[in-house]
Image: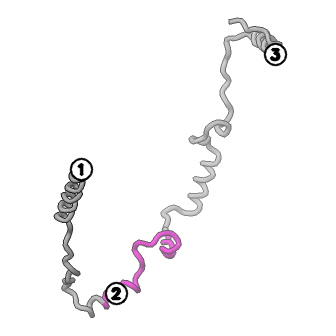
Amino acid sequence: MTASKILSAVAVALMAVAGAAHAETYEGVHQLTSAASRADVAGQAVVAAHSANPYATGANAGPAQVLVSSNSRDAVRAEAAVAARSADPYAEGASSGVAPIVASTVDRATVRAAARAAARGDALPL
């Protein structure tokens, strides 16, 4: 046998010994310890099965709670009418109303001349 085969056999044997040294041992099933008797646990299970699910969400949560408002119906309608007639503070873009007029410093004739030149493909003056 060559030296490399002997060294590889020794290395495999050492790894096997090292792996066996770290193996876990089986301790069996642990005994349950409880202060409640079987009858107590069965009674608690019946109560839990007949009570509402505290973790339910969405459709499984049951009917929604009725909210009681402190405002009268007429007061709410009046507030809605005022809000509908006022400007929308959250509007953006086209829904924000009429854009303000911005005064330009460029002559109208200059703008027309530049537009015609661009349409013809002429170079624009810089």
Q: Is residue 104 left or right of residue 116?
A: left
Q: How many marks?
A: 3
In the current view of this chain or complex, which residue is farthest to the top?
Answer: 125
Q: Nearer the viewer, residue 36 or 64?
A: 36
Comes first in the chain, label 1 or label 2: 1
Whether 78 is drawn above or below 67: the answer is above
At which x and y percent is residue 100?
66, 27
* Mark number displayed over residue 2: 1
Q: Amino acid at mark 1?
A: Thr
Q: CA distance from mark 3 to mark 1?
A: 89 Å
**Of 110 and 25, which appears nearest the observer?**
25
Q: Secondary structure at mark 1?
A: loop
Residue 43 on the magenta span: yes
Q: Would you place residue 89 above or below residue 35 in this image?
A: above
Residue 47 lies, in percent from the top left, at: 35, 87
Task: Give the residue drawn at x 20%, y 69%.
Answer: 24
Q: Position of residue 42 (x, y in %)?
A: 31, 90
The amino acid on which the numbered mark 3 sits, given as a three-letter code, is Ala
Magenta range: 42-66
Hey, which quadrant is residue 14 in on the image? Answer: bottom left
Task: Check the image and name the residue furthest to the left.
Answer: 21
Q: Is residue 41 left or right of residue 108?
A: left
Category of crowding for the residue at label 3, using alpha-carbon neighbours closer than 10 angstroms: few (below 14), some (14–19), many (at least 20): few
* Helix, strand or loop under label 2: helix
* Alpha carbon distance from label 3 to label 2: 85 Å
| Residue shown at 20% from the left, 60% from the top | 13
Q: Position of residue 109 (x, y in %)?
A: 78, 9
Residue at the disc numbered 2: 45
Classify mark 3: helix, strand or loop: helix
